[in-house]
């Protein structure tokens, strides 16, 4: 609804109040949702009219809108329930419990059970928490105080609690002004006219009783200030109407013989006979849906009228010929960016990219783990990295909160720069979009978070309707939405019958519109109004399609793939809404959706068949292609910069390559040279020895000259972060890691408690029950530990002023949580428990946990700690548990006898038994993207199994250092990209490429970290690896390079008495927080558990070690390891 229509509602509310239409006033308040009358709400609540209270609330919010709304409805229904109990009306109380309060049980089952137990009490005040409950009147007053706070804090009630300041009888005043204006236009105005009706326009009767003439519609020029009195339905709001354009045929051609796709209702028109311009009269004749966009005009302007005139008569649509492309200078394939300049190692699967509109080497990247990064491709440096984080969970819908709790994984579906380069828009695969403000350098600030769509947000783009920056989004809920930069929703376009896959905002002269495509292959076009779509066409392939304009905005292209795998790249004739040209060159079948881009209003490029294919826009045949020196996925994603001299393309190993033409290469070298000169100038201003000066400059010189011309040959694996073939390794680090390039890099050493934040779990220390397994709950609010004696403990953090997020933190001591029944989660433990291997697995929604400690596997309810069932009695005993990622009823169970059982809990049956190891199973990990299960054993073997057939695909022996026996527990964990695999053994940390089933990088204990490795894990964003050592040290490594960036000594987290005792206390296990990448928790041999985080002032664990001639900190590879291992290395 437009802002003026909204104001009209307020005028009507004032009129109804003045006329004492009390019930109608509140009905309109509720139905419009514009004004929440707190006084009326209080009256009904104090009177106990609960049905009316909820009915009135329903006009403004629903139970599941957000946490505030849920709490409001809960307090009301709880009060209603308690009053029924107080009246001893048990049947009514049971009815309220079942019908009204049951909905809250899914969010807090314990609370619902406690409320239910009140039925068993003679007086519910026997419950300790309700002991101070007084009489009904005082209880309602107390409840209202709480409700007012919740309503005021609820963002859905923002700007709805205050009635605008109006002069008395404002609507009457406006009507009188209108009548006065009508009277001035009378041909025979009488001095004291008699106004008898508002249903028809006023005219004074002519003299001598002659018949009154028909009211005359005057031209706009004949009326003073007509815009002041324009009808509400056609009012221009804050955006003035644009003058008619000379040519609106482009979009009109698409619109011929089409109708709005959604039903519309006539708009409200004020009782006025004001003469208006002819185009405004015709607009009012069209049925329209009032806009629901406060502050945004109903986009009915002269341009729109020009189009509608053409639609009303096919003969009036001028024949439009497709504009010939402008004459361009001669060109050749050398103009295409086809030469590989460098490879950037993102570390997670790249899902989307976009170059800055004016800083042509600055690239924004979105990833499959929800992370976004900014790369300066000219320096091969990652300037900024932002892991996914929910900025304000309370403002998000309950649907989103439930979805993220059920499955915390989230990916970036689109990253896009605003046209001015001041904002980055990020769309995610669950509900949200983020808007970052970019101020240059490393200044990327959170600007806006919107819970935009239900399900996947498939696309995000920027537009400038009437010079106002807007964000256009589309998603799973079949909607297209337009938002302003403050997060206010301006338009909500309905009409698609399937999820909307892409949007393409554009402007032709003064006509601004949006093309959209859905997964059913339908193409629609929308003006910025609420009259429905103007176009309904089928895209080739009738599945997922993306539309793009050429750089000059004159030519429209689309590229998509059918469900059968056939790909289509076409050019459209806008004037006819028909395909003008279909490009050839795609292979017969594709396994996914082909991505494409345009550049220089001359070339098209698409990623397919592990290569990049280029077309001249005027030729349907492939112009040329390149495989970018290998390593591309089957359907690479690609993006040109705005100048067309750089091209970014994704690689199969979670990175991207930058390709350039001669001009692009020249620009990149210029950026490197400027960086070098700047650093050199900084160094020369300092008084240093010549030797140190050379040492500091030499890496920079190497970097300037380092352009990746790597051959496809695959050398030996990289050990301890050192490339044994001395190949150039591209640097990957945040801008905060390079704040002063003149300073030599130093390993960050945390040796004192004052250098980090740490909290110890209460009631955790028990030397007889040392921590064997440790994990965070998937929601991130708790820690679950399994001890060597089979006892499980749970710690939870509460939401409070010190911890508003309610997530695990080292700033607040959590509660050792136990249910009211006093039960303890204790496993079946045999007599010879010293030999038992504890194992544990938590369901995705944190509702139940499976664990064992040498005996049967027990299934515990996480709310009550009750044992729901036991199964798989020994022998053999289970040694490792993991849930199937797509079915919580399927378990992979590693056994003491070296077998792996694929077990269906629901039918209590072992479906498959996998054999391939020689000793007990010590690790299991699934990869859904590769469709494999990886197992590791105490025999230092790694096996790869097909999930489909459970056949063994390959078995690898870990390269063990000379003199070491190939024994000991081996753990495996997948990177968030589901391709790279972290393998931990007491002798090493290693990274494998699971898609090729080969070792690519290895680190062995050395220097300050020379003891055996106890455990290791990825951080939640897979950018770091945390490792613990048997001497008490904790190492923090870069996951990409396995270079040590920080050492946390035991003195930083252990009391002095413990660190000085003869019995060495060290972390047996380490686990990483599921949302906070710099938070880790360790379980120690003395039974204690600690959560450790860097200081707030630091915000991270050290900085990335630089590369100097391929050797970090001058370290060399261990010859024993080098000689003992020869797997092929993934091309980097």
Image (cartoon, grey):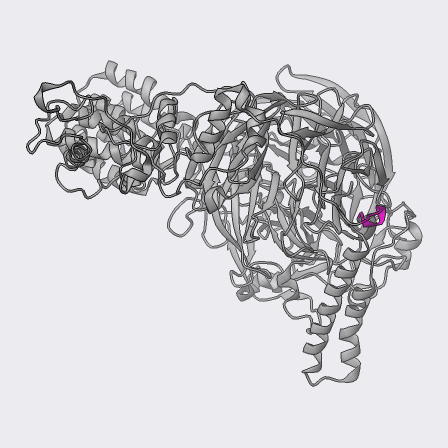
Picture quarter containing residue 700? bottom right
User: Foreground residue, 464 or 886?
Assistant: 464
Q: Is residue 907 above or below residue 1040?
A: above
User: Foreground residue, 489 or 178?
Assistant: 178
User: Which residue appears at 84% of the width and 50% of the height?
Assistant: 339
Look at the image and say whether residue 334 sits in the magenta stretch.
yes
- Rendered location of residue 804, percent (x, y): 41, 48
Along the horizontal axis of the image, is 812 left or right of 1118?
A: left
Look at the image and say whether residue 178 sits in the magenta stretch.
no
Q: How many marks?
A: 0
Q: Is residue 517 above or below residue 335?
A: above
Q: Please, which residue is most extreme toward the front here?
A: 208
- Rendered location of residue 616, percent (x, y): 79, 38
Q: Is residue 1106 visible?
A: yes
Q: Quadrant of the N terminus?
A: top left
- Which residues, given as a range, are shown in magenta? 330-336
User: Which residue appears at 32% of the width and 26% of the height?
Assistant: 115
Along the horizontal axis of the image, is 768 left or right of 327?
A: left
- Rendered location of residue 1108, percent (x, y): 80, 66
Q: Please, which residue is most extreme toward the left here?
A: 192
User: Which residue appears at 70% of the width and 73% of the height?
Assistant: 679
Picture quarter containing residue 501? top right
Q: Is residue 131 visible?
A: no
Along the horizontal axis of the image, is 166 left or right of 881?
A: left
């Amino acid at each position: 609804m437009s802002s003026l229509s909204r104001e009209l509602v307020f005028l009507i509310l004032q009129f109804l109040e003045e006329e004492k239409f009390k019930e109608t006033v509140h009905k309109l308040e509720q139905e419009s949702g514009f004004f929440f009358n707190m006084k009326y709400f209080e009256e009904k609540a104090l009177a106990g009219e609960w049905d009316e209270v909820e009915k009135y609330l329903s006009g403004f919010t629903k139970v599941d809108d957000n946490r505030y709304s849920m709490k409001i409805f809960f307090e009301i229904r709880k009060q209603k329930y308690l009053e029924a109990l107080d009246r001893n009306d048990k049947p009514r109380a049971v009815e309220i419990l079942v019908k009204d309060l049951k909905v809250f049980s899914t969010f807090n089952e314990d609370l619902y059970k406690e409320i239910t137990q009140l039925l068993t009490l003679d007086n519910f005040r026997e419950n300790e928490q309700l002991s101070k409950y007084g009489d009904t009147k005082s209880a309602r007053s107390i409840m209202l105080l709480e409700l007012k706070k919740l309503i005021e804090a609820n963002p859905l009630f923002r700007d709805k609690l205050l009635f605008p300041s109006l002069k008395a009888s404002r609507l009457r005043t406006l009507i009188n002004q209108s009548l006065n204006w009508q009277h001035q236009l009378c041909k025979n105005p009488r001095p004291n006219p008699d106004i008898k009706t508002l249903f028809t326009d006023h005219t004074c009767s002519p003299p001598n009783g002659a018949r009154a003439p028909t009211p005359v519609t005057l031209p706009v020029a004949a009326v003073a200030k007509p815009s002041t009195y324009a009808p509400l339905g056609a009012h221009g709001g804050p955006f003035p109407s644009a003058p008619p354009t000379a040519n609106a045929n482009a979009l009109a051609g698409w619109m011929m013989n089409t109708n709005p796709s959604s039903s519309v209702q006539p708009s409200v028109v004020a009782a006025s006979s004001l003469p208006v311009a002819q185009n405004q009269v015709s607009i009012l004749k069209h049925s329209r849906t009032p806009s629901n966009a406060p502050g945004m005009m109903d986009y009915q302007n002269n341009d729109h009228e020009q189009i509608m005139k053409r639609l009303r008569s096919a003969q009036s649509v001028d024949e439009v010929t497709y504009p010939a492309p402008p004459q361009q200078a001669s060109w050749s394939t050398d103009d295409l960016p086809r030469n590989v300049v460098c490879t950037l190692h993102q570390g997670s699967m790249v899902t989307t990219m976009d170059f800055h509109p004016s800083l042509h080497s600055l690239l924004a990247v979105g990833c499959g783990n929800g992370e976004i990064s900014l790369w300066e491709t000219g320096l091969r440096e990652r300037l900024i990295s932002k892991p996914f984080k929910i900025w304000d969970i309370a403002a998000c819908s309950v649907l989103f909160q439930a979805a993220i709790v059920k499955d915390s994984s989230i990916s970036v579906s689109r990253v896009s720069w605003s046209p001015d380069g001041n904002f980055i828009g990020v769309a995610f695969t669950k509900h949200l979009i983020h808007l970052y403000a970019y101020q240059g350098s490393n200044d990327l600030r959170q600007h806006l978070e919107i819970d935009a769509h239900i399900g996947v947000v498939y696309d995000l783009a920027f537009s400038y309707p009437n010079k106002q920056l807007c964000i256009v989004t589309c998603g799973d809920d079949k909607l297209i939405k337009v938002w302003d930069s403050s997060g206010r929703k301006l338009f909500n376009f309905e009409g698609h019958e399937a999820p909307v896959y892409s949007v393409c905002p554009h402007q032709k002269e003064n006509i601004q519109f949006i093309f959209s495509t859905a997964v059913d292959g339908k193409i629609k076009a929308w003006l910025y109004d609420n009259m429905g779509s103007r176009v309904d066409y089928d895209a080739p392939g009738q599945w997922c399609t993306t539309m793009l304009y050429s750089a000059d905005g004159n030519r429209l292209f689309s590229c998509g793939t059918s469900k059968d795998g056939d790909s289509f790249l076409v050019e459209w004739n806008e004037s006819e809404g028909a395909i003008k040209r279909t490009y050839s060159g795609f292979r017969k079948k594709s396994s996914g959706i082909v991505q494409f881009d345009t550049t220089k209003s001359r070339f098209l490029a698409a990623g397919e068949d592990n290569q990049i294919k280029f077309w001249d826009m005027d030729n349907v045949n492939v112009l040329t292609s390149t495989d970018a020196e290998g390593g591309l996925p089957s359907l690479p994603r690609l993006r040109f910069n705005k100048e067309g001299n750089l091209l970014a393309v994704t690689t199969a190993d979670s990175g991207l390559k930058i390709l350039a033409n001669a001009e692009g290469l020249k620009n990149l070298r210029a950026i490197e040279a400027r960086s070098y000169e700047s650093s050199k100038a900084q160094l020369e201003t300092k008084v240093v020895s010549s030797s140190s000066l050379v040492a500091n400059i030499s890496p920079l010189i190497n970097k300037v000259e380092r352009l990746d011309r790597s051959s496809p040959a695959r050398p030996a694996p990289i050990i301890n972060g050192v490339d044994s073939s001395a190949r150039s390794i591209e640097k990957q680090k945040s801008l905060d890691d390079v704040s002063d390039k003149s300073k030599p890099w130093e390993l960050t050493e945390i040796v004192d408690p004052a250098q980090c934040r740490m909290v110890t779990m209460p009631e955790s220390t028990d030397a007889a029950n040392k921590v064997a397994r440790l994990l965070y709950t998937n929601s991130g609010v708790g820690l679950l530990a399994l001890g060597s004696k089979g006892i499980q403990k749970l710690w939870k953090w509460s939401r409070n002023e010190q911890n508003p997020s309610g997530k695990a933190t080292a700033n607040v001591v959590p509660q050792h949580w136990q249910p009211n029944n006093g039960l303890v989660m204790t496993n079946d433990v045999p007599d010879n428990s010293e030999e038992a291997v504890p194992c544990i697995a938590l369901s995705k929604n944190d509702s139940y946990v499976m664990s064992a400690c040498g005996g049967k596997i027990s299934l515990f309810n996480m709310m009550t700690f009750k044992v729901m069932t036991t199964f798989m009695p020994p022998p053999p005993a289970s040694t490792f548990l993991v849930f199937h990622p797509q079915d919580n009823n399927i378990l992979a169970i590693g056994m003491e006898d070296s077998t792996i059982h694929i077990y269906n809990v629901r039918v209590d049956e072992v479906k498959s038994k996998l054999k391939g190891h020689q000793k007990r199973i010590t690790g299991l990990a699934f990869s859904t993207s590769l469709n494999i299960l990886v197992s590791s054993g105490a025999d230092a073997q790694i096996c790869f199994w097909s999930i489909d057939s459970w056949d063994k695909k390959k078995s690898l022996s870990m390269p063990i250092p000379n003199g070491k026996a190939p024994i000991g527990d081996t753990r495996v964990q997948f990177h968030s990209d589901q391709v790279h695999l972290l393998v931990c053994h007491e002798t090493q940390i290693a990274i494998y490429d699971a898609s090729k089933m080969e070792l690519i990088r290895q680190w062995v204990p050395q220097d300050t970290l020379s003891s055996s490795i106890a455990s290791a894990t990825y951080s939640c964003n897979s950018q770091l690896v945390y490792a613990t050592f048997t001497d008490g040290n904790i190492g923090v490594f870069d996951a990409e390079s396995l270079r040590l960036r920080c050492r946390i000594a035991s003195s930083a987290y252990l009391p002095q008495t413990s660190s000085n005792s003869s019995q060495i206390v060290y972390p047996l296990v380490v686990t990483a927080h599921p949302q906070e990448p710099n938070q880790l928790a360790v379980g120690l041999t003395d039974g204690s558990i600690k959560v450790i985080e860097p200081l707030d002032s630091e915000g991270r664990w050290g900085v990335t070690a630089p590369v100097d001639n391929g050797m970090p900190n001058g370290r060399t590879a261990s010859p024993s390891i080098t000689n003992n291992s020869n797997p092929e290395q993934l091309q980097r």
